[in-house]
Amino acid sequence: MKNDPLLTRDCSTYQFPRASFRKLLFHNNRGIALITVILIIAILMAVAIELNRSSYADIHDAANLSDGIKLTYIAKSGFYGAASLLTNSKNDYDTLRDDWAKAELLSEKSANLFTDGYFIATVEDEAGKIPLNKLVNGNEYNSDIKEMLIRLLSEPEFGLDEKKAAEIVDSIKDWIDADDIITGYGAESSYYASLNPPYAAKNAQLDCIEELLMIKRVTKEIFNGTKEKPGLAGYVTVDSDEAININTAPKMVLRALSEGISAELADKMDEYRRKEGNDLSSPQWYKQVSGMAGVTIKPELITVKSNYFKIISTGRMQNMAQSVSGVIKKSQQKSFQIIKWRQD
């Protein structure tokens, strides 16, 4: 067998034929080019996806902004619509038979006013609630307001014992009065300084009802209520005069007006004041209610006129919502002034 020159030739000096080398180089260049093209395509796809995501996010944000603006104006429409009902009162006294107390009818019609949304508006008479800022005269208790608050918090719906009710009322007084003397079960700055974070007692009137959450023993459950229990916030106010409108007060506030008013009698009072034709121009109408002849409410504690109302209006559109709320003061010239405003 003849020796193969390829096998006997020194490999270190062996030279590939030119044609074979060009062919190998050509194949290598094609592979590199293919990889380069794939990388470029991958980069372009990533850039395209990011641009698409960014554009979609911008469009989505713009749509949300547009919808948010629409919702705000829908909610404001409900607010001013409810306010107009307050100025259309035909009597010089306020009742739950007035148009403003039926704001849900206005809400029902709102779907016809907007192409893709509606509002839900409610009106609350602040004069129908217990005025917290009238709890203190100087640095002393206003005994009438104190007794009403104690009776309110002692009602079984709140589930508080007598001591806890007194502790809350004493703490509210200490928060409002100007001195640093602890009242009964109350608390002054020495107590609040021990909390985390620490703060001082205000020693001034409440500016908003939410301040109650800063006061000793007023928990979120007591303030807002739960499914089983009412919330204190629905029965007290910082925006009214001392007298309570007996025509509009919630039934639990009616029970707090006198020890002699039971839950059953409060139901009868509510039924009487809602019935068309019954005269509610004088706060003494309660004497006409069956079972109330022997009950006395101090005349200076009750009225039939209201000046301050809270309006809450929520604009809704698909799964979005925007709320505005405020307190207005009604004047005798059938106009109103917004004294508080909040947009959530």
Image (tube, helix red, strand yellow):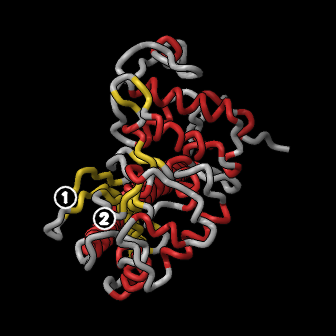
Q: Which residue is mark 1?
A: 337
Q: Real-space Cα distance between discs 2 and 1?
A: 20 Å
Q: Residue furthest left?
A: 333
Say whether residue 278 is visible.
yes
Measuring 33% from the left and 38% from the top, which residue is drawn there?
207
Measuring 56% from the left and 51% from the top, which residue is drawn there?
258
Q: Which residue is mark 2?
A: 72
Mark 1 Cα within 10 Å, few/some/many (few <14, many 20+)? Answer: few
Which of 124/127 is in front?
Answer: 127
- Residue 250 appears at what percent x and percent y? 52, 61
Q: Quadrant of the N terminus?
A: top right
Say whether residue 59 is visible.
no
Q: Earlier in the sequence, mark 2 or mark 1?
A: 2
- Residue 307 appears at what percent x and percent y? 28, 59
- Residue 115 appears at what percent x and percent y? 34, 85
Horizontally, residue 189 falls left or right of residue 14, namely left
| Secondary structure found at label 1 | strand
Q: Quadrant of residue 33?
A: bottom left
| Secondary structure found at label 2 | helix
Q: Decide: is 265 above or below 153.
A: below
Q: Residue furthest front?
A: 294
- Residue 68 appears at what percent x and percent y? 33, 63
